[in-house]
Image (cartoon, grey):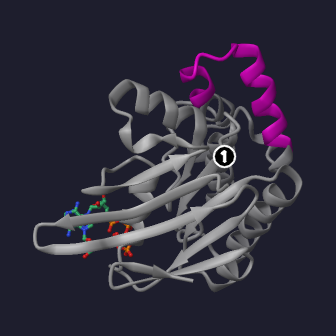
Amino acid sequence: GNMLKATNIKKKYNQLEVLKGVDISVNKGEIVSIIGSSGAGKSTLLHIIGTLDTADSGEIYLHNEPVHQYRNDKLAAYRNRHMGFVFQFHHLLPEFTALENICIPGWIAGRKKKEVEQEAIRLLQTLGLENRQDNKPHALSGGEQQRVAVARALINKPSIIFADEPTGNLDSTNAKEMHHLFVKLRDEFHQTFLIVTHNEELAGMSNRVLHMKDGLISE
Ligand code: ADP
Ligand code: ADP
């Protein structure tokens, strides 16, 4: 079956019906992009499927786990362990080094400190950041900051990475590099992605592109 399956997702803000019963499924190792005009509800959908926001109705299954039923501590732990997030802005913690920022979700998950650090160092190498591990975010370029954010999203080997305009704040060179990184993570590690993007190149590299319009999705 599908790694991720969400059915009949509905969301209203006051009188505004943003999501009118969205169905979406993602298979392991796929990059799926969601495109559509500004205000179409793409971010709302991604936040709901990533359990950062709640729907008015609908079901979300990740590996057949009914995550829409999870609440509070169980939900937070599940999200930290099995879902990775990359946003338009990196949201790294300014007082911590690149290595520490990457390790934090692993430490929160209660994994062994040494094991998490070794994994973080491997990720720094994979992402071409090996000489940046002791730098704090302000000392890194925009492209490097966003790659650290990707490494942080990967540290717990999540089932899926949710990315909301991940290259929206990067220049075209860094954006291109990020797109190739996502493809490499998919092809070499079977990493699964669900991405909201305006970037045609990134959408073009996806396995599937979903169009959001009038509160519904079409392929
Ligand atoms: P997109 O990501 O496609 O640009 P969004 O999901 O951000 O669209 O927003 C969809 C619609 O829902 C917009 O009209 C937006 O103003 C509205 N919206 C989003 N979040 C809220 C909120 N917390 N409260 C009220 N309206 C919201
Ligand atoms: P993005 O850049 O990802 O589309 P926005 O800047 O639209 O995000 O929204 C940032 C935050 O504000 C989100 O948490 C979203 O839910 C909320 N938000 C967006 N539109 C509205 C709105 N019309 N009223 C209240 N909150 C909103």
Identify the image quadrant of the C terminus: bottom right
In the image, what residue occupies the spot 39% across and 79% down? 216
**Looking at the picture, how far across and down is residue 12, in whole percent?**
20, 66
| Residue type pointed to by label 1 | Val
Report if residue 189 is visible in the image: yes
Rendering quarter of residue 37: bottom left
Looking at the image, residue 194 lies above or below residue 86: below
Rendering quarter of residue 123: top right
In the image, what residue occupies the spot 52% across and 68% down? 165
Q: Give the residue pinned by disc 1.
A: 148
Crowding at mark 1 (Cα within 10 Å: few <14, some 14-19, many 20+): many
Q: Along the horizontal axis of the image, is 29 left or right of 109?
A: right
Q: Main secondary structure of the magenta part?
A: helix
Identify the image quadrant of the N terminus: bottom right
In the image, what residue occupies the spot 38% across and 24% down? 73
Q: On the rendering, which quadrant does ligand 1 occupy?
A: bottom left
Helix, strand or loop status at disc 1? helix
Residue range in magenta is 104-125
Q: Along the horizontal axis of the image, is 190 left or right of 5?
A: right
**Looking at the picture, how far across and down is residue 126, in whole percent?**
85, 47
Looking at the image, residue 128 lies above or below residue 157: below
Magenta stretch contains residue 108: yes
**Mark 1 C-beta closer than 8 Å to ligand 2:** no
- Considering every residue shown, the one lying at the far front of the view is 1
**Looking at the picture, how far across and down is residue 17, in whole percent?**
22, 74
Looking at the image, residue 135 lies above or below residue 212: above
Looking at the image, residue 6 lies above or below residue 218: above
**Looking at the picture, how far across and down is residue 58, in whole percent?**
35, 57
Report if residue 140 is visible in the image: no
